[in-house]
Amino acid sequence: MAVDKKIVLRFPKRMVDRPIVYRLVKDYDLEFNILKASITPEQEGLLVLELKGNQQEYDKGIEFLLKAGVQIQSLSQDVTRNEERCTHCGACVTICPTGAFKVDPKTRKVIFEDEKCIACGLCIPACPPRAMEVHF
Amino acid sequence: MVKTIEEINEKIKAGKAVVFNAEEIIEFAREKGVKKTAEQVDVVTTGTFGIMCSSGAYFNVGHSKPRIKLGGGRTYMNDVPAYTGLAAVDLFLGANALPDDDPRNRIHPGEFNYGGGHVIEELVAGKDIRLEATAFGTDCYPRRKLETWINIKDLNEAVLFNIRNAYQNYNVAVNTSDKTIYTYMGVLKPNLGNANYSSAGQLSPLFNDPFYKTIGIGTRIFLGGGTGFVAWQGTQYNPSVPRTEKGIPKEGAGTLAVIGDMKQMSPRWLVGASVQGYGCSLTVGIGVPIPILDEEVLRYTLVTDADIVAPVIDYSDAFPQLKPDKLGEVNYAELKSGKIKIKGKDVPTASRSSYPKALEIADILKDWIKQGKFFLTSPVEKLPGAESGVRVRPLKERPIEE
């Protein structure tokens, strides 16, 4: 069975110089797409990955990461919309690189499809009432 | 058939006024015809909810014991500087004001998370605000320093006074350069990556009364969730621009200066805005009722998005350099379809102004009128019309000789 998941990886600083993603490809035959990375020497590293592959290999890959000391979190709930603050202006619609915001043609309200969100964070400062929140 | 405002107000008082919002009236008139609609309908309500930059508020905070003269000193509200060039305890706070220690665009694009607009939102939400002031001390106002919490309910006056709101039409902003730019019209992606517009279109007040036949000085309006008034024409008022056959200005034209008691207002309709790379501002909700005095007034309220054209302006060059160049014209039906064509390229569009909220405002105003809580006013003075010759002018710079 094939899986395709978006996950957030956090590296302690001692691991920043290790080729983690390479091992995922080489040992577990997983296909990856880096959605976001911030890795600074002497600090914690953060990597947002889309991982595709066979379910069994995927599970093994995740186990390898956990053993190596990487913290893993699923991406889906990382960017949320504060419904109280959203004014449905639409300023986010063309900012999102994956088209996670859509205007309902009838009500003109902005729909946030969080399964399309890759947590790049571009919408956060672009939202005038600051309704988009990131929780890493 | 001609009605007067007094007759309409009688019907409002009796709970018999027939009121539609500016979207519903289009369909109603299509079915019933203009003549019948003008006879049957008393009021059409409009609405708009967008970032309106020249907004602000003035306050009288009351005299402290012993007295302090804030005028001529420095005063901050939650670290945001307020204007103190007024008498002892009067202040003006502009929506664009920023704390002195805001990094601004030092790391470009700045985030501008808190400014005057946010203080206004928090005030109307009933939150306590930190007032800090220093003054120079006089015989009659000896105190030099003041630090206190204030709350809107304790202020003598808290008045929203926006000197330019409710723009009649506005630019569609694009970027033809090869890098992303951060403007008051939002983030504009390179090479015509997106197009941002900012008007409620067919619901917007001045599109429904393009020649200012009913909206004038003294018109009672919905403002920030309370009632307010049109105080004057707004700054940069520019009624003499080219118009379509139906009289709709083809670019930014009329504007309104509006005023109202902030104590009646709500944070739902006054929302602090952070504009990345540009600054802070205030999102303002305005609704204007249009009395259907005759067929001509009605006809203007039947404006649809397809009737409204707006200029496409390059914010990487024409706008900052004050060049008159336009990349073309598009109508609001096209803008709302999600993409427009510029120079043969499909460009995705986004609004800066909330249509659902504009509609909600028009409906609230409709309910107020139907419930006999809101009466219409005749303007005490008309706004300068399209034939007035009033024009906005650029600054004429003259070198200062030593």
Image: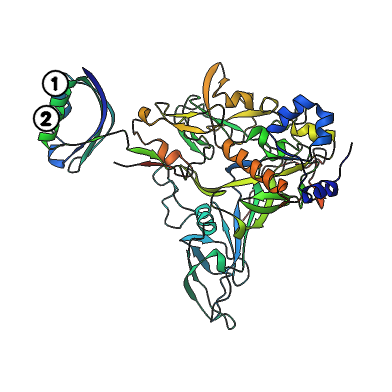
- Mark 1 to mark 2: distance in Å? 10 Å
Location of residue B244 in the rendering, given as x and y in whole percent from the top left corner: 75, 27
- Look at mark 1 in the image and give the residue it sits on: A28
Comparing B177 with B379, the one in front is B379
Total labels: the figure holds 2
Q: As displayed, is residue A53 above or below residue B206?
A: above
Instruction: Tell which subunit mark 2 falls on.
Output: A
Residue in the picture at 56% in, 53% down: B266
Residue B162, can we see it? yes
Comparing B394 with B193, the one in front is B193
Tag 2, which secondary structure? helix
Comparing B185 with B5, the one in front is B5
Residue B245, can we see it? no
Residue in the picture at 80% in, 39% down: B292
Q: As displayed, is residue A93 above or below residue B109?
A: above
Tag 1, which secondary structure? helix
**In contact (CB < 8 Å): disc 1 and disc 2:** yes
Location of residue B189 in the rendering, given as x and y in whole percent from the top left corner: 46, 29
- Image quadrant holding the C terminus of chain B, namely bottom right
Q: Residue furthest right?
A: B1
- Look at mark 2 in the image and give the residue it sits on: A64
Residue in the picture at 17% in, 43% down: A42
Q: Is residue B48 left or right of residue B134?
A: right
Q: Earlier in the sequence, mark 1 or mark 2?
A: 1
